């Protein structure tokens, strides 16, 4: 029933509630079974449900190490990893390398995400922009970043500039692709509306294009955050003198598998944490959407 | 009443300078199909005109031409419309990512003043207190009322509406008719209401046009006193003449056929 005014809606709702109550009584009296149709969308979210998978994985690691299915030489047991992490923290190596890695990742993410959004807007809102930008980005996408490293070293040296540039080049692509796709998918009727209410170009970008492409932007951002960690590993294992990747490649030289696992756990924790953070922001910003995510 | 029937000539020469709408020789083509064929149309300030026509007769094409939304459509002719005009579409076309009030004041300049006008416009359409609702939280009728508020908050000289109630249920539509009449009497914009509902046209409009094969084939004033009752014999006469012009006449009365 479509509401015609708030007043009448309230009236009708009260009435139909009363009706439902009487029906329920009747049902109980006749003890008829009430069948409801099975819903196809997933039900309401369970609190903390996203942690369930990771926790099960951790439990499996603990149990298989404890009963000896998992050999310590294959994968260090969790308690050794905790002890090693404690030692690394005590002598300050974990913190200092982590800070270096985080700084690189954050700087590259900020630059890469901004570049991805600007390029997506330019390509999505003008034909010339699309002609100039979209092709090169697709080409960049087809070239593995790893293959660019030798050239990047020649061009930018082996300093921070090269590392950040390499991460930026990996990070901006998912943001660009998804934001651009989402922008292109905005219903053209909204552009028509913007014309009839006389929006100027920047108002159109701010009120229509940007908010309308946010769903794609967030998909891209989540991929980009993960990609930034992956790119970090790659660049830090080549010619680096600091960072988590450096810590791990050194450990490899000395055969310290426990340190390698500490590095992996750090990546895992930060990967999960940053993804959770982005999802949280996404949920807040896109609260207008009615989706299966709930 | 019968004297109105069949009047195809222009009404007593209107003062051109103060017309709300004037088109001369308006032609629009899609491919080699001429959808509007040299349409001459005038609407006076504050006049409420309904445009009837079969599906595909070019009503939306005409309205979009007046709204200057038909960028890539071939055609010629002169269009004179006020700069300050609003459009109401069949879908409410609210931005789903903006709450109700920002939707109403979309594109209005003037900061807090605009906000106040938006709140007042929402109150006028009976949605006071819903400023912070999301469009998806509103019923179809409520969404369309927000769209009306968005149009009227601009105090337009010309309101163009393309089947604005077409997607609503019958009960809601009747309420919306009342609301639209009331709002138009208060703000007095010139109105061009596109509809395929003959009763809607007779209930609301001061003048009813019928578009067929790209031409205006009937231009009929409607000065029945308001509120207009469906059982009023003059209402029935209007309706039959219009239906005949639309090619679905029920009675074989001579006047009706004279229109076609
Ligand atoms: N963008 C378009 N491209 C091609 N043909 C169109 C387009 N818009 C409308 N038409 C055609 O023009 C005719 C009139 O359309 P329209 O004005 O929407 O009719 P109405 O609103 O009266 O139902 C229809 O036959 C339709 O198919
Ligand atoms: Mg139409």
Image (tube, grey):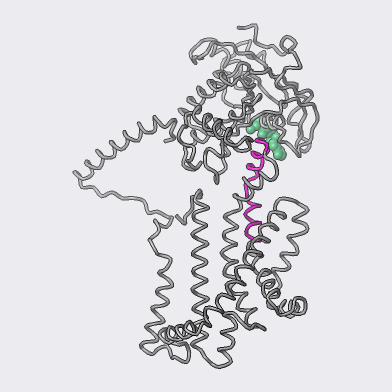
- Left or right: residue A289 compared with residue A144: left
Q: Position of residue A92 (x, y in %)?
A: 51, 82
| Residue beneath the point at 72% across and 64% down | A137
Query: Most extreme residue toward the left, as rendered?
Result: A29
| Residue beneath the point at 59% across and 28% down | B152
Q: Position of residue A14 (x, y in %)?
A: 32, 34
Compared to residue B193, the image places residue A158 above or below, namely: below
For the magenta stretch, what is the residue range?
A176-198
| Residue beneath the point at 53% across and 20% down | B182
- Asked if residue A190 lies in the magenta stretch, the reply is yes
- Of residues A101 and B21, the one nearer the viewer is A101
- Of residues A251 and B40, the one nearer the viewer is A251
Query: Most extreme residue toward the front, as rendered?
Result: A91
| Residue beneath the point at 57% across and 31% down | B164
Q: Quadrant of the N terminus of chain B?
A: top right
Q: Quadrant of the C terminus of chain B?
A: top right
Query: Most extreme residue toward the right, as rendered?
Result: B76
Q: Position of residue B236 (x, y in %)?
A: 54, 14
Compared to residue B178, the image places residue A80 above or below, namely: below
Tell me which secondary structure the magenta stretch mostly adopts.
helix
Q: How many marks?
A: 0
- Left or right: residue A140 compared with residue B119: right
Dividing the image into four quarters, tell me where ligand 2 lies. Answer: top right
Q: Quadrant of residue A181?
A: bottom right
- Asked if residue A116 lies in the magenta stretch, the reply is no
Q: Position of residue B190 (x, y in %)?
A: 64, 21
- Left or right: residue A77 compared with residue A125: left
Q: Quadrant of residue B258?
A: top right
């Amino acid at each position: 029933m479509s509401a015609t005014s708030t007043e009448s809606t309230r009236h009708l709702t009260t009435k139909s509630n009363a009706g439902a109550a009487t029906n329920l009584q009747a049902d109980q009296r006749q003890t008829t079974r009430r069948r409801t149709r099975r819903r196809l969308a997933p039900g309401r979210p369970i609190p903390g449900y996203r942690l369930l998978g990771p926790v099960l994985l951790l439990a499996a690691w603990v149990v298989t190490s404890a009963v000896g299915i998992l050999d310590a030489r294959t994968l260090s047991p969790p308690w050794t990893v905790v002890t090693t992490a404690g030692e690394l923290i005590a002598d300050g190596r974990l913190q200092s390398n982590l800070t270096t890695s985080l700084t690189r990742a954050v700087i590259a993410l900020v630059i890469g995400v901004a570049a991805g959004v600007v390029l997506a807007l330019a390509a999505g809102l003008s034909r010339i922009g699309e002609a100039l930008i979209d092709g090169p980005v697709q080409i960049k996408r087809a070239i593995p970043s790893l293959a660019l490293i030798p050239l990047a070293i020649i061009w930018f040296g082996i300093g921070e500039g090269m590392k950040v540039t390499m991460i930026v080049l990996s990070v901006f692509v998912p943001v660009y692709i998804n934001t651009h796709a989402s922008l292109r998918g905005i219903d053209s009727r909204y552009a028509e509306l913007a014309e009839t209410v006389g929006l100027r170009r920047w108002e159109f970008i701010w009120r229509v294009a940007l908010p309308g492409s946010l769903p794609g932007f967030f998909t891209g951002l989540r991929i980009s955050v993960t990609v930034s960690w992956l790119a970090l590993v790659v660049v830090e294992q080549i010619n680096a003198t600091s960072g988590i990747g450096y810590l791990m490649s050194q450990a490899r030289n000395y055969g310290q598998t426990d340190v390698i696992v500490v590095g992996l756990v750090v990546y895992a924790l930060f990967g999960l944490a940053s993804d959770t953070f982005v999802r949280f922001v996404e949920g807040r910003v896109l609260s207008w959407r009615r989706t299966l995510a709930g | 009443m019968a004297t109105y029937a069949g009047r195809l000539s222009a009404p007593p020469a209107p003062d051109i300078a103060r017309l709300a709408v004037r088109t001369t020789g308006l032609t629009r083509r899609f491919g080699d199909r001429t959808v509007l064929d040299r349409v001459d149309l005038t609407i006076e300030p504050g006049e409420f005109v309904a445009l009837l026509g079969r599906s595909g007769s070019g009503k939306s094409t005409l309205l979009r031409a007046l709204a200057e939304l038909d960028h890539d459509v071939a055609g010629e002719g002169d269009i004179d419309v006020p700069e300050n005009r609003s459009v109401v579409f069949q879908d409410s076309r609210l931005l789903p990512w903006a709450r109700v009030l920002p939707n109403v004041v979309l594109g209005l300049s003037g900061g807090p003043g605009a906000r106040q006008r938006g709140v007042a416009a929402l109150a006028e359409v009976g949605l006071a207190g819903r400023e912070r609702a999301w469009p998806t939280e509103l019923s179809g009728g409520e969404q369309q009322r927000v769209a009306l508020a968005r149009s009227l908050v601009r105090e337009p000289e010309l309101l163009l509406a393309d089947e604005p109630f077409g997607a609503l249920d019958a009960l809601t539509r009747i309420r919306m008719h009342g609301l639209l009449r009331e709002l138009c009497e208060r703000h007095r914009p010139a109105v061009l209401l596109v509809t395929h509902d003959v009763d809607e046209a007779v209930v609301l409009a001061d003048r009813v046009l019928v578009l067929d094969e790209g031409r205006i084939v009937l231009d009929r004033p409607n000065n029945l006193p308001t509120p207009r009752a469906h059982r009023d014999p003059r209402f029935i006469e209007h309706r039959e003449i219009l239906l005949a012009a639309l090619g679905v006449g029920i009675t074989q009365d001579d006047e009706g056929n004279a229109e076609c």
